[in-house]
Amino acid sequence: MNEQTKKNLDELYKELRIIRTYDHAVAIIDFDFETCAPVEGRGDEGDVISYFANKKFAISNSGKMKRTIGYLYGHIEELDELDRILIRKLNENLEKTAAVTAKTQLKWLKIYNQAYIDWLKAKEVGDFSLYKKSFCAVIKASKEKVALRKNALPDLYDNLLNDCEKGVLSATLDKFFDELKVGLMELIAKIKSSDHVIRRDFLSRKVPIYKQQEFSEYVLKLNGYDFKRGHISTTEHPFTNEIAKNDVRVTTHYFENMFLSNLYSVIHEGGHAILMQNEPEEDFEHFINDSVTNGMHESVSRFYENVIGRSKEYISLIYPEFHRLFNEELSDVTERELYEAVNIVEPSLIRTEADEVTYGLHIVIRYEMEKAISAGKISPAAAKKEWNRLYREYLGVTPKNDAEGILQDVHWTNDFGYFPSYALGNAYNAMYLKRISSEMDFKGAIARGDLAAVNDWMKKNVFAEANRLTPEKWLLKLTGRPLTAKDFLEYLNDKYSEIYGF
Ligand SMILES: [Zn+2]
């Protein structure tokens, strides 16, 4: 590396350390915003977040930063592998935002913050009309954002998809979702025609929140979440936040009469957190630690939630603690009954409460809607009607109000493109499930409670290069095959034919 390159790299690292400090501060305020800030205080706190995020944006996009990145991009062959990944990423971001002024950036941030506030209010009374204005503003902001980009892809939605899952565009997703939709519809029909009855009377029993809290901590620890570098809080819409290398926080939502809701939220968010707590040390040193795509992240969280958490072996593992802690409320529930109950398949309204099988159709609906709205085929104002129509057609259910319909998810207070990643996550993890099962006694490890062995394999294979490769390359290296819905459909058919007896 020549002297000038070394100087530029040092300069870049100095700036990135400052940016990381801003990110750290914003993440803490944001965590506060979403977990405990009072409703009336959220407007002001949102302004504080915007202020610091905007400061960070100014540093990231300063002339000095642009020159430094530009120089290093021109001398990329002198850098080591991880710095190359960093510089390519920074250069790509710069190209996206080169024409965005700090003022425009601030305007967008305010739109998103306002949208979040309006969404909360609209959801509370279950009325989409109260959110319409913000929804239109968010979509307009996405359009403006893409229009200002250098090297933008021709299609608006492809740009948004590419932001979430680099390289996975609608041409690939159309095929993937078609295959998934057909496979799921066939499987649901088989399940519907089965006469096996799953016991469910105990699912709505009152289970005190303090007991659910204790159980949440038990499963998080069991799965390998490190509480010395973590924390758990409550929120409206559960999420996980990597505040810093040694501070990865998960959130959940407790319902007294729906104990499974919290349990699987916690296992899901815990999965995100386990990935974050086990990223390679060098990825932090080279500032590429937050590069895992949404789809890769979801593949991990849903691996812990479904493939592990809803397996026979896992239920058998947690059953003694379940029986001990919920003895007063659920002592008459057998292990098999619990296993079947966490795997009931039934079309429903709420995505986050959906089972593994119908879940994919919730995503198909959102994918089709995002694509149609982005292409101007459906106006944002008509979105509610389309939502309800698709739910009737694919799942045979109709929401009573918008809180259990179009307003249920927080995602549309920001850019489109995130939802497909949930379905991709399922497809990815079903593909690497085949490999882990061939290389170790996967089911046996879960049954023995040796989650450390599973986490070790995940760390070596799934996590190790997730920050460094595109989803396509990562998947190919990990599984030797390109994206397919087949493995996921096979996994579901194997599991549910045993449960429902067909
Ligand atoms: Zn998730």
Image (cartoon, helix red, strand yellow):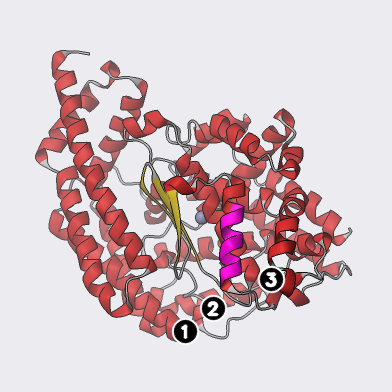
Label 2, secondary structure: give it.
helix
Residue wearing tag 1: 126
Quadrant for residue 470, please give it.
top left
Which badge, 3 or 1, comes first in the chain's sequence? 1
Quarter of the image with the N terminus is top left
Mark 2 is surrounded, within 10 Å at the Cα level, by few (under 14), some (14 to 19) or many (20 or more) other residues, namely some
**Could you tell me which residue is drawn at 53 percent across and 47 percent down?**
225
Circle 3: residue type: Pro
What is the spatial separation of the Cα atoms under label 2 and label 3, in whole angstroms?
14 Å
Residue wearing tag 3: 347
Horizontally, residue 230 falls left or right of residue 147, namely right
The reply to whether residue 386 is visible in this rendering is: yes
The reply to whether residue 294 is visible in this rendering is: no
Label 1, secondary structure: give it.
loop
Marks 2/3 in contact by CB < 8 Å: the verdict is no
Horizontally, residue 39 falls left or right of residue 491, namely left
Circle 1: residue type: Gly
Percent coordinates x, y for residue 425 in the rendering: 57, 48
Mark 1 is surrounded, within 10 Å at the Cα level, by few (under 14), some (14 to 19) or many (20 or more) other residues, namely many
What span is in magenta?
210-219
Which badge, 1 or 2, comes first in the chain's sequence? 1
Quarter of the image with the C terminus is bottom right
Residue wearing tag 2: 404
Circle 2: residue type: Glu
Marks 1/2 in contact by CB < 8 Å: the verdict is yes
